């Protein structure tokens, strides 16, 4: 255990690291609680899953649309200047949503509320940008991203269960109140830490902005993130349906928690190693493990078997997310990391939306196993994407002069103006 925790203790010992890591985790509670809390509130108050689904779809769509613009804003003017007004929009949207639902207002009012609340900014990238600003070596950044992935899994293990308990036993809107309050408290602490905030990127004559000129490596890993999202959305709804078919619907949350715990364990151990295997190979290996695990999951005959297989398959989730994050970190300048991560969040968010909708359709018209087949298909497609785009990811993440099998050269070895090499191939326009 000492060996496992040692790399994390090293990076957390940096001045301000523990504080921004904790406050950043608290600030992104809405990532795991907001949507499910809004869905439950609408379903309970209006008695319609269909209406709740429409409102959630509008929210997910606008969340995806706002991710890159708000990420660019945070890069350009600084996290504090960007996130304060965005946080206010989120609070206004959440309050309006609670008021509208409790008072049975028309559905279009809920649409306005969820659109406002979805303009929450790049909550998942704020601390990752701070790690990239604070740390100098690729190895330390790899460990930090693995830690962030593991902490995200803590949220996704506990968030949906907490939201469900609050909505069904306390008050339909209680989950939204807790989610929004956590974000406000977390952001207040995080944004007060100016010493670890990455400097704003100002416009200059030699500006290296992403805009729509996206490096092909980022496009490749965004499609991998899209596959992950479809898999997540299909698994969530299919596991609930599977548990209901087995006569144990109340245990569905525990089964999902076991899968998320597998991801947590995988991410924790993955971050303790300084891998010599090239990043593009690790990406293929991770997606292959997910494809195998999700395919085997479709053969589950009871909830215990599903949970055990899900745990083993889940071990590859956080490492795969870490590999995607690291690929972005390798191909963009340090002051553009938030925007680069934003493309991954768009891919994953769109995937979750489609996976949940398609998975629900398959469950309603066929059975839970059909939804699990969709998750397996998404994982297999994701592996195919990783294999097909391997040459692109390899060129974008391996720097000249590095021996085969070695990891990339630390950014600290580069000059201030080119801390990480630009992709050796022309970006898409």
Image (cartoon, helix red, strand yellow):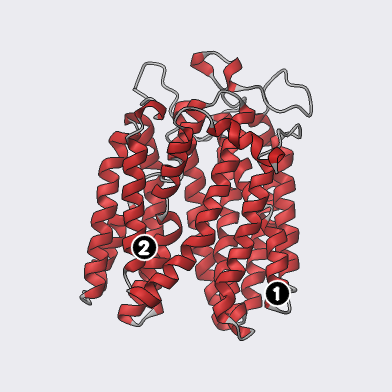
- Describe residue 119's horizontal placement relative to residue 301 as left or right: left
Q: Residues within 10 Å of mark 1 (few under 14, many from 20)?
A: few
In the image, taking residue 213 as reference, residue 56 lies left or right, namely left
Residues tagged 1 and 2 counted as in contact (Cβ below 8 A): no
Residue 205 in view in this figure: yes
Extreme residue in the right direction: 404
- Residue 335 percent coordinates (x, y): 44, 27
Task: Identify which residue, 163 or 425, lies in the foreground.
Answer: 163
Nearer the N terminus, badge 1 or badge 2?
A: 2
Vertical placement of residue 167 versus 61, above or below: below
Q: Is residue 299 above or below residue 424?
A: below
Give the image quarter of residue 283.
Answer: top right
Which mark is on residue 196? none
**Which residue is labeled 2 in the image?**
58
Q: Is residue 333 visible?
A: no
For the residues labelled 1 and 2, the Cα–Cα distance comes to 35 Å
Residue sitting at the far top: 415
In the image, residue 120 lies at what x, y percent? 34, 49
Q: Which residue is mark 1?
A: 304
**Foreground tag (1 vs 2):** 1
Q: Is residue 198 above or below residue 240?
A: above
> How many neighbours does mark 2 have within 10 angstroms: few (below 14), some (14-19), or many (20 or more)?
some
Q: Secondary structure at mark 1?
A: helix
Q: Secondary structure at mark 2?
A: helix
Residue drawn at the location 43% of the way across and 37% of the way down: 19
Viewer-nearest residue: 144 or 107:
144
Residue at 73% x, 79% y is 301
Choose between 47 and 390: the one closer to the eye. Answer: 47
Residue at 58% x, 64% y is 257
x, y percentage for residue 323? 63, 41
Q: Nearer the viewer, residue 290 or 13?
A: 13
**Left or right of residue 33: residue 8:** right
């Amino acid at each position: 255990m000492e060996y496992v925790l040692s790399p994390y203790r090293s990076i957390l010992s940096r001045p301000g690291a523990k504080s921004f890591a904790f406050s950043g985790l608290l600030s992104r509670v809405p990532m795991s609680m907001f949507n499910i809390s809004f869905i439950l509130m609408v379903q309970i108050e209006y008695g319609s899953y269909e209406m709740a689904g429409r409102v959630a779809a509008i929210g997910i769509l606008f969340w995806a649309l706002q991710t890159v613009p708000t990420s660019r804003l945070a890069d350009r003017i600084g996290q504090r200047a960007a996130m304060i007004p965005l946080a206010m929009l989120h609070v206004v949207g959440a309050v309006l949503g609670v008021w509208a639902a409790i008072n049975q207002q028309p559905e279009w009012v809920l649409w306005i509320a969820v659109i406002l609340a979805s303009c929450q900014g790049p909550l998942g990238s704020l601390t990752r940008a701070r790690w990239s600003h604070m740390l100098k070596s690729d190895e330390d950044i790899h460990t930090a991203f693995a830690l962030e992935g593991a902490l995200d899994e803590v949220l996704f293990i506990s968030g949906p269960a907490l939201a469900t308990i609050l909505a069904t036993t306390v008050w339909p809107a209680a989950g939204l109140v807790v989610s929004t309050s956590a974000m406000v408290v977390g952001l207040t602490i995080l944004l007060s830490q100016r010493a670890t905030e990455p400097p704003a990127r100002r416009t200059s004559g030699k500006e290296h902005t992403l805009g729509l000129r996206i490096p092909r490596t980022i496009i490749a890993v965004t499609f991998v993130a899209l596959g992950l999202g479809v898999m997540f959305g299909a698994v969530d709804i299919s596991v609930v349906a599977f548990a209901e078919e087995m006569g144990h619907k109340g245990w569905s949350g525990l089964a999902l928690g076991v899968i998320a715990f597998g991801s947590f364990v995988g991410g924790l151990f993955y971050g303790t190693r300084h891998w010599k295997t090239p990043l593009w190979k690790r990406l293929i290996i991770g997606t292959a493990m997910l494809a195998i695990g999700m395919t085997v999951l479709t053969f589950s005959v009871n909830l215990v078997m599903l949970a055990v297989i899900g745990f083993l398959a889940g071990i590859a989730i956080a490492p795969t997310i870490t590999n995607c994050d690291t690929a972005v970190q390798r191909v963009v300048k340090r002051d553009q990391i938030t925007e680069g991560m934003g493309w991954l969040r768009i891919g994953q968010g769109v995937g979750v939306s489609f996976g949940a909708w398609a998975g629900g359709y398959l469950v309603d018209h066929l059975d839970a196993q059909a939804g699990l087949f969709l998750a397996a298909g998404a994982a297999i497609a994701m592996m195919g994407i990783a294999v097909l785009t391997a040459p692109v990811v390899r060129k974008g993440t391996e720097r000249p002069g590095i021996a085969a099998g070695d990891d990339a050269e630390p950014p600290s070895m580069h000059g201030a103006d080119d801390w990480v090499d630009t992709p050796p191939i022309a970006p898409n326009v």
